[in-house]
Image (cartoon, helix red, strand yellow):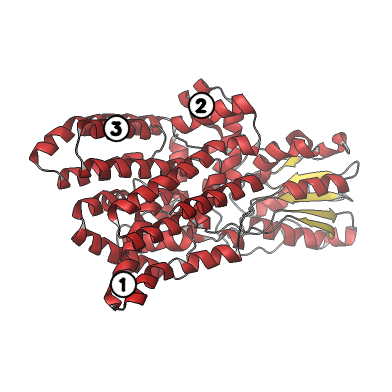
């Protein structure tokens, strides 16, 4: 066990030390942490359409004030949370599982690249995990020995946890139900004050979170995480079985495990086995997951990829229990010992094939080479979702946001081509894109148009994405287009005469920009042609 904890910590530190570039949501949180005071962070809605628990914001801001705003500092609190979660997962596994199964549960958690990657992400997902494993461990302790001291510790941890983790409210509901169902009548009376305090603090945290979300942001979040909600009304067997598919998605889209259906089956077998062997412990692990699924059915909280990272620890405990049961059914001593560990092999093989440092959306090499190739008079057009990357990293490479032409977000594809038409006649025109959304096909359509009216002179591509798991709506990180800068000559009159924004044929796609534009620049913009001319080379 100790070796697994060391390996898990090393994996997380490896990813953290590799210093991957901040991606879109991290850049948005970083901007808030760098530009606001503690009071400003917790008293008003965050900029750039972000949501984060106040405890996470306060601690992260304190670190920025103390140590600066480097990527390492912005990710320090998530790293500490991820490291602290390791021993709590080990304690939980030891309390409820057989020794072999406990080793497997810790191995799956410690050596999963898709879990370790969040140790180096400036978002609150790692603190979500720490809160659930801490509360689960304290609840299991109280069930073993229901003393006042342990109940007090669990009470305080729950009251504090809701301010460091938004889904902690769901966890507290699940744990409260589990404890009520498992306790005797005298113990239930002792639980009442704790549950009342939890209810009050949870209600306040929900009211606080809602007050920091505009109606537009709430609508965007419902659209963005729409696949994390159960379809209503149900129209097929698949819709009815949506909760099962959502759990399978944790192993597939979040953990990136091979054979996710197998792991989902092992988890279900583990639930049944643990309910028979240790009902109270099983309920403590199961009901927070069940309440989260119920919230997704009610469209109150999405059960989708990274926002449900916190359900991974209990699910992996159930996987380990299921694998252990499978080994026992074989009734061969050797296979009984080997079967649980076989379940750890696929994730470990995946880790060996794709080790840290996992990188994604790394625009830094593109900006560095663009600045080296840039000449006086060049115009640099920035595709609108890239603006946060340029805002944060541009000044490091002599490309501050005010020196580029920032594109706008549009509701129809042809409007992007009309923006490009403003640059007809330019001999050196740069098209810079980061966080490309190939599914919507905005940038491919823009590049196709530029290839018709101009000559592509140079392409600067960023490194490929190696991050395990998926973005929203199941798009694999590794399938996303690279960040890139394209240099065009748009001065050939023959090419320019061959097409216009009005005449260009476009693919029949339905843009989601009316919702996605929340990620665009804070004020709708029309590019000011040639901003970069006055900047020249740096």
Q: Nearer the viewer, residue 171 or 434?
A: 171
**Contact (CB < 8 A) between labels 2 and 3?**
no
Callout 3: SS: helix
Dot 3 or dot 1, earlier in sequence:
3
Q: Earlier in the sequence, mark 2 or mark 1?
A: 2
Q: Residue at x 32, y 67 (%)?
A: 324
The local secondary structure at tag 1 comes to: helix
Give the Cα distance between marks 2 and 1: 50 Å
- Quadrant for the N terminus in the image: bottom left
Give how far across and how far down residue 20 sits, in percent. Answer: 65, 48
Residue sitting nearer the eye, 300 or 98 = 98
Looking at this view, is 486 or 477 the one in front? Answer: 477
User: Which circle's residue, 2 or 3, is located before the other in the chain?
Assistant: 2
| Residue, disc 3 | 153
Q: Picture coordinates of residue 237 (x, y %)? A: 30, 69
Identify residue for label 1.
326
Q: Where is residue 378, by image quadrant?
A: top right
Report the side of 293 relative to 28 (left or right): left
Q: Quadrant of residue 273?
A: bottom left
241 lies left or right of 481: left
Residue 464 spot, x, y in % from top left? 68, 59
């Amino acid at each position: 066990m100790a070796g697994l904890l060391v390996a898990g910590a090393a994996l997380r530190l490896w990813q953290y030390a590799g210093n991957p570039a901040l991606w879109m949501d991290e850049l948005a949180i970083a901007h808030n942490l760098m530009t606001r005071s503690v009071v400003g962070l917790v008293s008003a809605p965050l900029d750039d359409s972000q949501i984060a628990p106040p405890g996470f914001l306060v601690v992260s801001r304190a670190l920025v004030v103390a140590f600066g705003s480097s990527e390492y500092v912005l990710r320090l609190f998530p790293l500490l949370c991820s490291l602290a979660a390791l021993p709590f997962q080990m304690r939980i596994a030891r309390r409820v599982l057989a020794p072999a199964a406990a080793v497997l549960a810790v191995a799956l958690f410690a050596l999963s690249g898709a879990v370790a990657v969040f140790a180096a992400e400036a978002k609150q997902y790692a603190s979500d995990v720490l809160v659930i494993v801490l509360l689960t461990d304290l609840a299991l302790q109280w069930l073993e020995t229901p003393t006042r001291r342990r109940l007090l510790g669990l009470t305080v941890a729950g009251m504090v946890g809701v301010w460091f983790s938004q889904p902690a409210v769901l966890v507290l509901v699940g744990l409260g139900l589990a404890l009520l169902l498992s306790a005797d009548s005298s113990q239930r009376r002792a639980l009442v004050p704790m549950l009342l305090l939890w209810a009050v603090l949870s209600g306040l945290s929900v009211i606080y979170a809602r007050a920091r979300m505009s109606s537009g942001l709430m609508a965007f979040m419902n659209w963005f995480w729409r696949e994390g909600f159960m379809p209503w009304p149900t129209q097929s067997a698949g819709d009815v079985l949506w909760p099962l598919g959502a759990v399978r998605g944790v192993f597939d889209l979040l953990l990136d495990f091979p054979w996710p259906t197998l792991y989902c089956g092992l988890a279900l077998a583990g639930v049944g086995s643990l309910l028979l062997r240790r009902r109270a412990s099983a309920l403590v692990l199961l009901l927070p997951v069940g309440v989260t699924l119920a919230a997704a059915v009610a469209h109150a909280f999405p059960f989708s990829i990274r926002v449900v990272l916190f359900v991974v620890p209990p699910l992996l405990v159930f996987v380990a229990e299921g694998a252990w049961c499978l080994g026992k059914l074989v009734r061969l001593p050797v296979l009984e010992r080997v079967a649980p560990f076989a379940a750890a092999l696929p994730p470990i093989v995946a880790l060996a094939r794709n080790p840290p440092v996992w990188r994604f959306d790394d625009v830094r090499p593109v900006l560095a080479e663009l600045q080296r190739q840039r000449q006086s008079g060049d115009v640099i057009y920035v595709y609108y979702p890239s603006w946060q990357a340029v805002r944060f990293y541009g000044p490091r490479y002599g490309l501050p946001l005010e020196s580029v032409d920032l594109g706008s977000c549009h509701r129809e594809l042809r409007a992007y081509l009309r923006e490009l038409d403003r640059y007809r006649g330019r001999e050196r025109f740069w098209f810079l894109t980061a966080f490309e959304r190939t599914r919507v096909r905005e940038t491919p359509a823009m590049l196709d148009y530029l290839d018709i009216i101009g000559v592509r002179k140079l392409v600067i591509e960023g490194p490929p994405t190696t991050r395990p798991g998926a973005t929203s709506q199941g798009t694999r990180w590794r399938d996303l287009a690279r960040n890139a800068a394209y240099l065009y000559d748009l001065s050939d009159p023959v090419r320019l005469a061959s097409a216009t924004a009005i005449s260009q044929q476009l693919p029949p796609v339905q843009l989601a920009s009316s919702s996605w534009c929340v990620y665009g620049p804070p004020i709708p913009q029309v590019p000011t042609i040639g901003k970069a001319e006055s900047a020249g080379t740096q």
